[in-house]
Image: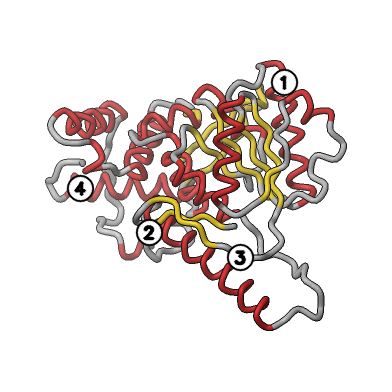
Amino acid sequence: MYEAIGAGGLESISYDIAMDVAQIVAGAPGGAAAAERIVAAAGLRARRPLDAARALQSETLLDGVQLLLLEAEGVPSDLLEPLLIRLGAMAEARAVPLIATVAPDQIDVALALLPESAVLHCAPSDVDRLGAVLAARREPVARLHDGMRDQETMRMRRFHEEVARIADSLSRLTRSEVLDRPASGVRNEASAFRMDGDTVETNAGEIRRVIRARRMRAEFFEGDLFADPAWDMLLDLYAAELEHRQISVSSLCIAAAVPPTTALRWIGTLNEAGLFDRKADPSDRRRAYIALSESARRGMERYVAAVKRAGLSLV
């Protein structure tokens, strides 16, 4: 059974195929129930959820499992760090996709200890959850007998085409399209508006005033109308660099002025684009920082200089 989000709500589409298996680790019954609901909607079969203590002790946690979901809210603080380390290591070793849903105060430790391949959520909607599960499903290995009938083959093909279609639709709804751009995410210096040999000074206070002005729009208009998390995070990181401060992932999520799961998705996108660098705290492995990459820093400097030379205001 496969359930999809349609115009009239949840629609059921039946396919007689072997289902992938998901293992849920949850710190609270509510998180386990939410994960089970989404797993069922995505057409997977969920094993009995485990709490943190059982997950830390289980020797067969990922045996026969194609997807691992962690609902970290409610996990005891003394178990959270070893749980993140163990689940991350096991998922990476077995090449099993890991989707972790965390509380706001768990974002930094989760990003620091989980592998970069893990998908991180915070206060996600059902659409966020379902989209992540559908996107994480790997191409299945053929499990039917060699003598399967043509009808079964076509049914399998239609099923996976439907999964791909819905995953694409969810991606378009929940994540802005990224335009074609160089790998660094920054335009070539040769095409940027600038005056060679000339520099324009700026300071953190000036960038912070721009950020405050952008936040004031929410007092007069619905905030979602002008959501621009990528630029808000670039401005915040640029100001922090001018102040010689480090920015944690949770702080950057706040600066994005969008829901935490959306901010985390954008952080991943900008990291892949070569604009962000993820740095571990050498004194505390439970904390990670985000900084502008060298190319992003140069891009911000050139942008600020070009705007000032043109007699315009930063926005």
The residue wearing badge 4 is 307
Task: Tell me whether the residue at label 4 lies in contact with that at label 2, contact meaning CB atoms closer than 8 angstroms.
Answer: no
The percent coordinates of residue 258 (x first, y second) are 35, 36
The residue wearing badge 3 is 15
Q: Name which of mark 4 and mark 2 comes first in the sequence.
A: 2
Q: Name which of mark 3 and mark 2 comes first in the sequence.
A: 3
Give the residue type that dot 1 points to: Leu
The percent coordinates of residue 227 (x first, y second) are 28, 42
Please name whichever residue, 242 or 250, is drawn nearer the observer in this view of the structure. 250
Q: CA distance from mark 3 to mark 1?
A: 40 Å
Q: Name which of mark 3 and mark 1 comes first in the sequence.
A: 3
The residue wearing badge 1 is 79
Q: CA distance from mark 4 to mark 3?
A: 57 Å
Q: Residues within 10 Å of mark 1 (few under 14, many from 20)?
A: few
The percent coordinates of residue 292 (x first, y second) are 46, 41
The residue wearing badge 2 is 177
